[in-house]
Amino acid sequence: MLLKKVSIAGLEAFVKGEEYGAFTTKPISEIRAKSYLANPHAQADDVVLYLLIKDNDLIAFRSVVPGYLPDEKVRFAWLSGTWVHPEHRREGYSMQLLNEALTNWNGHLLSTNFAPAAHQLFKKSMHFKKVYQQEGARFYGGAKLSELLGHRFRKLAFLLPLADVAMSVLASLKKQFYQPKEQAGSQLIETEFPDDACYQLAEQLKGGLVFGRGREELEWIFKNPWISKTDDRWLQVYPFSSYAKEFQYFTLKILDGNELKGFMVCLLRDGHLKTVFNHLDEAGYEVVADYLKQLALVRQVQTLTVFDSHLVEALNGGRSPFVFHKKLSQFIYASFPVSCAAKKVQDGDGDFIFT
């Protein structure tokens, strides 16, 4: 078994090389590699891919994304994906690669938006502690339960089409009786990406964020997406998000006259909407909440995922076009001391904003 590490300096050559081309499963997509190379927090010698190779084929891999904590002035890496070949699972390879990453990153690793298996790995490693938990919610509109629950209730698959019909009827009834509120005073404008005024506000307020994302980080994210709307070949060879028929960032700007009062960035992917970044005041949350309700109707949104507690509260106020909602938690685990108590964690922190 060969352990191979790929740094930022060698990533481009690796993705263009024969070894990468011969792998049945790819450890990174080309579009994601481009984003890694453009990361403003990445340095040339940062290891971002850990590979285990046997008989010239990939057995397991782990990828990480370099980050920076401005208050602590600490460089770290977000754990972004781990995969083990089905024939080699439960053989300790995930733990081996995690330990390699811990060594390379001086014990400075963070993780959010992780699968249950990753949670068990953190507990087993004894290196990680929960440093943040936020209670959010997922709101359901005309969601297709057969798509959302089919993998969990295979034995009841024959009943799920009936559940889809029931959800559709309930959603139609909710839409018929939903009347949006009229907002006085503030004006909301929807654009694709933040403009200069939004970026200026982000720069002014980034000191109040745990991970300090400002203009530089946001422009990197929007200019280097991980999801393609045209190239679906990665669906067969890369085990993480790479393709969507619908993938769109959009920005909601709150104006008082000509003055920008706040903004929010959302991501809509194949009918599923989520909030990923915002600088809003109390009044702004109310305006955005009502707009998102209307947006859910117009764009036939199946689900809306929100972790910002202020926005969840605003969405729960008044009438709603959503059929129901359920509580959802956002966690951050760290292998070193990180304080998230005094400053804001954005919904899209980590790699959540990319997918």
Image: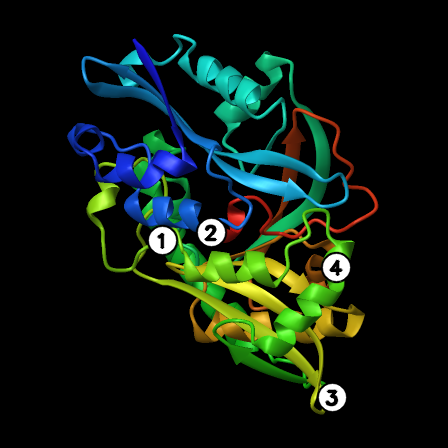
Q: Quadrant of the N terminus?
A: top left
Q: Residue at x 26, y 33 (%)?
A: 26
Q: Secondary structure at mark 2?
A: helix
Q: Earlier in the sequence, mark 3 or mark 4?
A: 3
| Residue type at the position of mark 4 | His
The colour scheme applied to this rendered structure is rainbow
Name the residue carrying label 1: 227
Residue 54 lies, with reference to residue 108, above or below; the image says above
Marks 4 & 1, CB-CB < 8 Å contact: no
Q: CA distance from mark 2 to mark 4?
A: 23 Å
Q: Residue at x 67, y 72 (%)?
A: 200
Residue 192 lies, with reference to residue 59, above or below; the image says below
Q: Secondary structure at mark 3?
A: loop
**Is 67 placed left or right of 92 in the picture?**
right
Residue 266 at x, y = what percent?
54, 63
Q: Secondary structure at mark 1?
A: loop
Q: Residue at x 75, y 63 (%)?
A: 205
Residue 310 marker? 4
Q: Nearer the viewer, residue 112 or 101?
A: 101
| Residue type at the position of mark 2 | Phe
Q: Nearer the viewer, mark 3 or mark 2?
A: 2
* Residue at the farthest right position: 342
Marks 3 & 2, CB-CB < 8 Å contact: no
Residue 184 marker? 3
Q: In the rendered picture of this protein, how many numbered marks are placed on residues?
A: 4
Q: Nearer the viewer, mark 2 or mark 4?
A: 2
Q: Earlier in the sequence, mark 4 or mark 1?
A: 1
The crowd level at tag 2 (other Cα within 10 Å; few <14, some 14-19, many 20+) is some
